[in-house]
Image (cartoon, coloured by chain):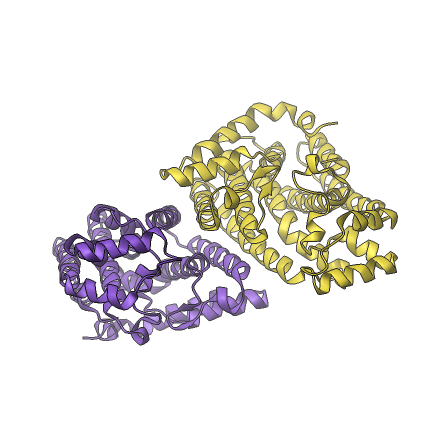
Chain colours: A purple, B yellow
């Protein structure tokens, strides 16, 4: 099953949100407009708006109110990608040139800042005042997550907990907030809002773990960047942590790499092979599935009207997605 | 007269705001906390909170409400400095090491993002809902200003209007918003809010023009960076525009520099001498004073209770400040 099939009934609404995002990044300054439009056109699954829409189905579905949170959420995600590309020195994102490489680091920095500010402005139009502080807090947590990721780079002896804490801030949080805000702006009960927030958190964890698996098993075409890129940059994810715990020789090779990456760059193909041989892919899938199950449990706990099928399917999809 | 004397009567309130800023940047993450505290301790005149306080005197002065806008305004200013230092590759700011040089570019990027988000969160506590969108729009304009500054670098043939438009966004806007929000949260009339917003705009223009004069006439100790730094980085400000229009030889030398700055770096001492000899300093002071006068005219138009003395003095001070 493809993602698009799961939310087919919401397709017109997603297109409207897409249009609204496009409209909102039409900055008055030509370079800013081009840079923003460029990152927008680079695509993406718009997973955060989709979660807002699906969660809003539990209450009084009002696309006008939904837009005022779905658009900022996607913009915050986009802005964080623009800033990540500066930091990662990345030239490609989803197979397209990054703003940083198409223009320069400075344009990327201020384009990111601009999109953050735009997101904030749109959120001010929501009639639910809590929206602002929920978004602002999420943005702060995401920054902490990014700094943690920098500090944890090339740290081979990190505990699984450290990895989980990092991906919680880096990815799970914004998906969790997407579900929470969808529930909030459709006026569901506090209990339902909490259940959907937790659902989003668990799905978000599964989403990032799956992403981290795909970095090793995906093709360059599917990933839009070479396989093993994360590890080559020193980002130690669950599959690598697992493989190092099972394969002493791989761990030692990784130590050499981590000690002096510029002198001993990662032998990416070998590393991928070691990871696959260690059973790390299966172990990571198990971990992702645990989170998928937890996510679905949260759905079952909701007592309000239940269009849960889509959210359940999306959780399953995320646990099994190929790219 | 020193700045501190002008607002002596507000000293306890400024200290409270200072404390609140310090409290707010106590991030839960150690590196983020250190980096934020570092930029905070690097000082600064806290000119934006001062303008909020002084403007709020026109209405019902309520420090608790004032804080909710003064703290975000100073944080937005701080965050923009952190991001500017990444972009400018600056190692010193106000004579102290920048976050970028003390840690690295990546930490500086996310520290800036974090402080922006924190500012947004604090503003959500204000009981005046307009505050959020005014701040969000100001942040967008500031980003456009920064991108304009990048594009205008090494452009010698720019019109004075281009310079004025750039400093409007870069500096005047946030000071204008400081005055506007001070007036707003103290419940003054729409007319007074507008007058103070315009006052802040004119004072902000004078402030930046004076800054641009000081770049040529200040000492390294006063400036916290070598004199002529702006021009050496290709930032063409009013004194340089004026001098080039009067001194053909200087213009030609500048053309050589601008065409290949890495090969023909600016002869800073010569450039400063040419600028001083051209009468650019006096002409720039005249321009700054024109804005000071416009600012004060706005004050005279206010019909509400008038504690205008301080704002008038501050405008004069800004037109004449030494550093």
Image quarter of the N terminus of chain A: bottom left
**Observer-nearest of A238 and B46:** A238
**Observer-nearest of B257 and B19:** B257
Which residue appears at 52% of the width and 38% of the height?
B39
| Residue B16 sits above or below residue A321 on the image | above
Left or right of residue A102, residue A318 in this image: left
- Residue B179 is drawn in which quadrant? top right
Left or right of residue A113, residue B286 in this image: right
Residue A81 percent coordinates (x, y):
40, 60
| Residue A216 sits above or below residue B47 on the image | below
Residue B316 percent coordinates (x, y):
76, 36
- Residue B187 is drawn in which quadrant? top right
Which residue appears at 59% of the width and 42% of the height?
B92
Image quarter of the C terminus of chain A: bottom left
Left or right of residue A231, residue B100 in this image: right
How many numbered circles are shown? Answer: 0
Viewer can see residue A45: yes
Viewer can see residue A183: no
**Observer-nearest of B215 and A305:** B215
């Amino acid at each position: 099953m493809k993602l698009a099939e799961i939310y087919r009934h919401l397709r017109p609404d997603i297109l409207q949100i897409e249009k609204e995002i496009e409209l909102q990044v039409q900055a008055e300054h030509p370079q800013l407009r081009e840079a923003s439009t460029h990152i927008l056109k680079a695509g993406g699954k718009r997973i955060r708006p989709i979660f807002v829409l699906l969660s809003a189905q539990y209450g009084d579905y009002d696309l006008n109110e939904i837009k005022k949170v779905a658009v900022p959420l996607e913009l915050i995600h986009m802005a964080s990608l623009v800033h990540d590309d500066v930091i990662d020195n990345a030239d490609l994102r989803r197979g397209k040139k990054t703003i940083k490489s198409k223009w320069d680091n400075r344009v990327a920095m201020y384009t990111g800042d601009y999109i953050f500010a735009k997101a904030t402005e749109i959120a001010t139009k929501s009639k639910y005042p809590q929206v602002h502080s929920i978004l602002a807090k999420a943005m702060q947590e995401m920054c902490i997550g990014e700094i943690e990721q920098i500090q944890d780079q090339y740290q081979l002896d990190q505990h699984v907990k450290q990895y989980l804490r990092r991906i919680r801030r880096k990815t799970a949080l914004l998906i969790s907030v997407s579900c929470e805000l969808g529930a909030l702006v459709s006026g569901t009960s506090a209990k339902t809002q909490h259940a959907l927030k937790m659902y989003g958190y668990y799905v978000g964890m599964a989403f990032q773990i799956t992403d981290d698996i795909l970095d090793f098993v995906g093709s360059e075409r599917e990933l839009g960047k070479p396989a093993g890129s994360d590890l080559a940059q020193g980002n130690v994810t669950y599959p690598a942590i697992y493989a190092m715990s099972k394969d002493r020789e791989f761990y030692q090779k990784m130590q050499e790499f981590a000690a002096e990456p510029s002198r001993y760059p990662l032998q990416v193909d070998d590393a991928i092979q070691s990871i696959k041989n260690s059973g790390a892919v299966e172990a990571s899938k198990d971990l992702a599935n645990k989170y998928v199950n937890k996510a679905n449990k949260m759905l079952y706990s909701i007592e309000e009207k239940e269009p849960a099928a889509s959210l359940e399917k999306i959780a399953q999809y995320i646990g099994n997605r190929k790219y």
